[in-house]
Image (cartoon, rainbow, N blue to C red):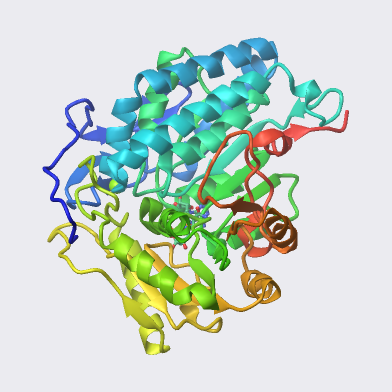
Amino acid sequence: MTSLFEYAPAPESRSIVDIRPSYGLFVDGEFTDGTGTPLKTVNAATEEVLSEVATGSDADVDRAVRAARRAFVKVWGPMRPADRGKYLFRIARLLQERAREFAVLETLDNGKPIRESRDVDVPLAAAHFFYHAGWADKLEHAGLGPAPRPLGVAGQVIPWNFPLLMLAWKIAPALATGNTVVLKPAETTPLTALLFAEICQQADLPPGVVNIVTGAGETGRAVISHPDVDKVAFTGSTEVGRAIARAVAGTEKRLTLELGGKAANIVFDDAPIDQAVEGIVRGIFFNQGHVCCAGSRLLVQESVHDAVVAALQRRIGTLRVGDPMDKNTDLGAINSAEQLARIRELTAFGETEGATCWQPDGDLPDRGFWFKPTVFTDVSPAHRIARDEVFGPVLSVLTFRTPDEAVAKANNTTYGLSAGIWSEKGSRILKVTDQLRAGVVWANTFNEFDPTSPFGGYKQSGYGREGGRQGLAAYLRSDS
Ligand code: NAD
Ligand code: MG
């Protein structure tokens, strides 16, 4: 967009990655055909078809679950924990060795800027495997009972916003605790999961320990409802999460759900404005706002509202929107035509309900799926853009006068995944944090992730925690 300096393009090369014209399912250590109708996956920035990917039918899912069960009973369950850890360390190192390949493939399939896939998604995915590799032979010291045992076969369904990272959040703790896995990636972003399957082969992971079954919602439904699955882990929309909770109710299956959010990012009048603006930008424009814990509701103290909004608009004017493969790009493409339609629908409500919409000048590319960074001011808590998850680069700005009002407004949501506070006063940060009903609260930063730190929500944001010692509990039986 308009900026002081024009940058020359700095495109990352795509030649490092070989995308096959078609992919099968990864079952029992091998790629096999799927029996459903294949899906095409496209580059969100160009609408170019990248590859055709198999769809797993009920029968294919059954084969994958049986392979996972065999591997659990015969190999992975009985294996010495320290040996399981060695496989996880090996996978982590292979992810690092092939980091550039993963980053390029993630950006092509998802539309996110290469800077983010290179500096965030892939390193964090490797970090999750390193972290959990360390736990594999120390589980009896995790405070989860003297001899915690694996559950068995985990059925895992993940979304498209962090395809490889969500895979790591699911697979690393499951394997470290001795479970085996059937994972279904999202239909618009299956390619890095299939490259991960190659890593499993390269690491000589015993066949059946990890199975990757691609396909859309029906394939996901088959995974979570298979009777021989012991544990279901899902990340995605609240609507699908609810359907899964109903399907699992009354069975012996254990369930964790990581659903949406509508996080408050609270800026007090004593906060350093320039730092807060950086945090606001990072909170809502990171990954095009396709982030369940995005800081999509800015709560700003009334006395600094005008100064913060002006500084924010100036900063947004310098963000570079466009080719995700360009290393200078800040905002890439919206992941799919469907998601773009959803973002447009919700922002249209913002205008008809009376909020004021602001977008920077500049053009968007002609092909692909794009949405400008958008700020709504004059938003009231009753507006849909203040209540519904947009899951796009759209910020709603509300104001408050006192800390109590900030807390009341922040908690006035059906979600409770994350929140942010900007203030120079430590005592205020501690007091407000204590009153927020959110799983993660960031102070003077936002969207900071670490495998050692548990992540998860309250209310309609789901239940269970991922990461940290708490995340291990979801994959272990502690009654011994
Ligand atoms: P979704 O919930 O439909 O899809 C997530 C995953 O669930 C995909 O792998 C999908 O194939 C699978 N799935 C769909 N129906 C299923 C079913 N009945 N049983 C089992 N698996 C099923 O999400 P979406 O349609 O891609 O996005 C819709 C909205 O969800 C977004 O606008 C956003 O608000 C929210 N969302 C949240 C997250 C998150 O990280 N919490 C991620 C993606 C989307
Ligand atoms: Mg795609």
x, y percent for residue 242? 61, 62
x, y percent for residue 468? 67, 35
In the image, residue 368 sits, relative to residue 262, either above or below, namely above
In the image, residue 451 sits, relative to residue 416, either above or below, namely above
Of residues 212 and 329, the one nearer the viewer is 329
Count of numbered marks: 0
Residue 480 location, quadrant: top right
Where is the N terminus found, in terms of image quarters? bottom left
Q: Is residue 106 left or right of residue 146?
A: left
Of residues 283 and 480, the one nearer the viewer is 283
Residue 136 location, quadrant: top right
Q: Is residue 143 left or right of residue 48?
A: right
Residue 102 location, quadrant: top left
x, y percent for residue 375? 37, 71
x, y percent for residue 87? 54, 15
Of residues 416 and 313, the one nearer the viewer is 313
Q: Residue at x 34, y 34 (%)?
A: 118
Q: Residue at x 53, y 23 (%)?
A: 208
**Res 79 visible:** no
In the image, residue 264 sits, relative to residue 181, either above or below, namely below
In the image, residue 253 sits, relative to residue 316, either above or below, namely above
**Res 395 visible:** yes
